[in-house]
Image (cartoon, coloured by chain):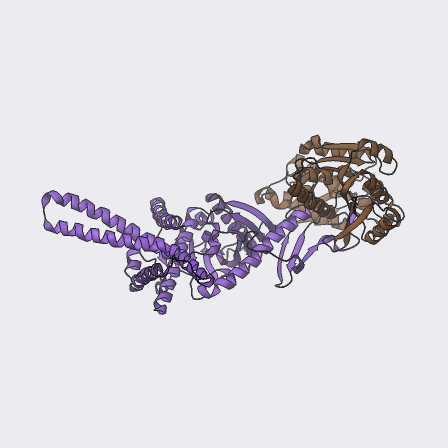
Amino acid sequence: MASSRLQLLNVTLSRTVRVIHSTLAQTQRAFHTSQPVTLTKILSVDEIFNKKSLQAHLRKKELEYNSWLESISSEPLREDEEDLNMKKKTDLSALRPLVQKIRELQEKQKELEDTQDLLKDNEPELQELAESEEDECLKVIQDLKQKIISLLIPEEESDMSDLVLEVTAGVGGQEAMLFTAEIFDMYQNFAAFHGWGFDILEVMSSELGGVRHAAASISGPLSYKKLKFEAGVHRVQRVPKTESKGRIHTSTMTVAILPQPTEISFTINPKDLRIETKRASGAGGQHVNTTDSAVRIVHLPTGTVSECQQERSQIKNKETAMTLLRAKLYSARLEEETSKRYQARKLQIGTKGRSEKIRTYNFSQDRITDHRIGKTIHDVRGFLQGEELLEEMIVFLQQFSEQESLLDLLRDSDQDQ
Amino acid sequence: MMFKTIWFRLMHRYSGVSKQRSVVRLSSSAAEGAVAPPADCSVTAEQAVRLWARHFTLHGISEPLLSSQYIISHVLGEKTLERVSRKRLRDTLTDREIERVWKLCSKRLTRMPVQYVIEEWDFRDLTLKMKRPVFIPRPETEELVSLVLEDLQLIQGESHRTDLRGLEVGCGSGAISLSLLRSIPQLRVFALDQSQTAVCLTTENANRLGLQDRLDVHHLDVIKDADAILSKCDLVDFIVSNPPYLLSQDMKTLQTEIFRFEDHAALDGGLDGLSVIRSILGLGSKLLKKRGRIYLEVAPCHPPVIQQLIEDMMPGLLYLETHCDLTNRPRFCILQKKGEND
């Protein structure tokens, strides 16, 4: 687990750098912040590490570890004491990787000091050797700091999920529906870009080739984790295809990201469901011939609705509608559990984030701005390809979110003291 | 063959939205008609869908938009319009495509069911060929297959048997048997139908799906050929059927799509709708292994009647349960052959 998170952080950082370099090589593109006041900064490893709160937190963790280590008993205990003992052992093993790294860091820092002392001695034969050892030490120290930071970032259970992506046209009529279709295509390409599965669950098209509403099941490693901050209202500003006088219109669409639960973790009582089909009228059965196999499911306790008319087989539509319903109910429950934690954050998930205007796609100025963190990228058409540019934005959001998590953690830790 | 002649006239585009005006002239009434598509105009798939939806509406054809969408997407090689790429929808149809669309849609104008027009439909995870007048599988029957599968999978799980055998009465297009065969790799099924056309269609669908090795299809009538069935078919673990269960008096209220095009023998269950069902139950007593089950799709009024029938006249059978369909109508009866100690 720790190594995969390290990899992510490394990948996150190095990929950003690679992407930035490649894009800069191609075109003139700059990063602006739209409003200096809401400038959101991604802190560097050193900046984070130098925070007093982080140092305090690490010390605290070490102390915790040591005290638990002492208190763990290897003698036979009473039953209730045994449970507590087991818990301490579990907590201990959870902390071990972090504490190990802290100790490694302390050792390396000592090594660095020793090497730097050698350099001061000014013996020429040792100079080169000492310098290269110093470099080596610094690299390892940087690496360890990164590892420690990523070990601190709390893991979300849902990050390992697959997800259901839902797009819905908002304000703006046909133009909004065309934009919705483009955004849906963008995410489809993004899924392909990452080698994820993209199964269309449902599409309701409009007459001009736009999309009223669509849903897809996306599956693959880290898919939910990457896409979870795409939820919200996306806004487009451009001259619509349907516009004859060349005026710019603003239209909106909404993206919802629903983590998909596994069978075991989430069950629904069939008695809570009302399933609606076309065949409700008449005697049904052999008495009726129809090609309308649409299915609509209502979860009575919560009023949540899902529907599907994607297939010619009714039972297949029912299964898809159930998948959609499960995703909606699961994400609602997840949100209940995490809402307190995310309350103050800039990056929201779940329904709180759903009505927020998160991003504007401005065609005439050729820019995409994410309003939560004040980040702008240029080349709208390129962005809508759903490849490197979208990845850039998402990586930035991920880093920012991790930073928010970390700072929250440190703040809480601080208050506990 | 008499012809119905229909003309359409397309108007020009107005502000990016097409308007079509159609002129329909019926020169005679006929069961099927040839149609000449207009030679001088170009039309996109999207426009064709809208045009024909309007025509169907004007002529009182049921589910006009769905009919239009299914037929045209079929011509374009897809099952549903959603699967046709947005670009393709906006491309002009080729001459061949136009001809085909017009030909098929004209058939729909005669109230032919869409499934017969495109000669294909889906049932669970299978795509089956449809051919009039062989009965078109209904969505309810998809649930019947689920019930059978649940039980069969339980049996397999407990006993790990690899020799399960079933009998289907009235196989029609083969929907039930082929779904079961597809899901249970070692199952073998004996299927029969009183219609030779149905027997041929089931065989054809079995071949298309590569399931022919485990399916025996026979041209037999469960009422008239009971002895022949008993001699040809070994004991089975279950019997499944969606038998004709409509009451004769209800036949005349059927929608035109069904009345005019589907085999009445696949629908008419006699005065009380139970004529075929009775024969199946009789067969069950003799052909089922102990504790073997019968799974029937029936009319909503039948379950209590069947229960009574069993008690009065078929002591070897036990009525297990009634299941409702998705619309909450009693639709499925499960019965069991009594064992030694039942």
Residue at the extreme front: A76
Q: Is residue A351 left or right of residue B231?
A: left
User: Residue B303 placed where, x, y %?
Assistant: 81, 52
The residue sitting at 50% across, 51% down in the picture is: A161
The residue sitting at 83% across, 34% down in the picture is: B230
Quadrant, the N terminus of chain B = top right
Relative vertical location of residue A409 with respect to residue A196 in this rendering, above or below: below
Q: Is residue A294 visible?
A: yes
Of all chains in the rendering, the one displayed in purple is: A
User: Residue B51 placed where, x, y %?
Assistant: 69, 47
Of all chains in the rendering, the one displayed in brown is: B
Relative vertical location of residue B257 with respect to residue A415 in this rendering, above or below: above
User: Residue B166 placed where, x, y %?
Assistant: 74, 38
User: Residue A56 placed where, x, y %?
Assistant: 30, 64
Q: Can residue A207 be seen in this view?
A: no
Q: Of A228 and A140, which appears nearest the observer?
A: A140
Q: Is residue A180 left or right of residue B118?
A: left
Relative vertical location of residue B143 with respect to residue B117 in this rendering, above or below: below
Q: Of A19 and A46, which appears nearest the observer?
A: A46
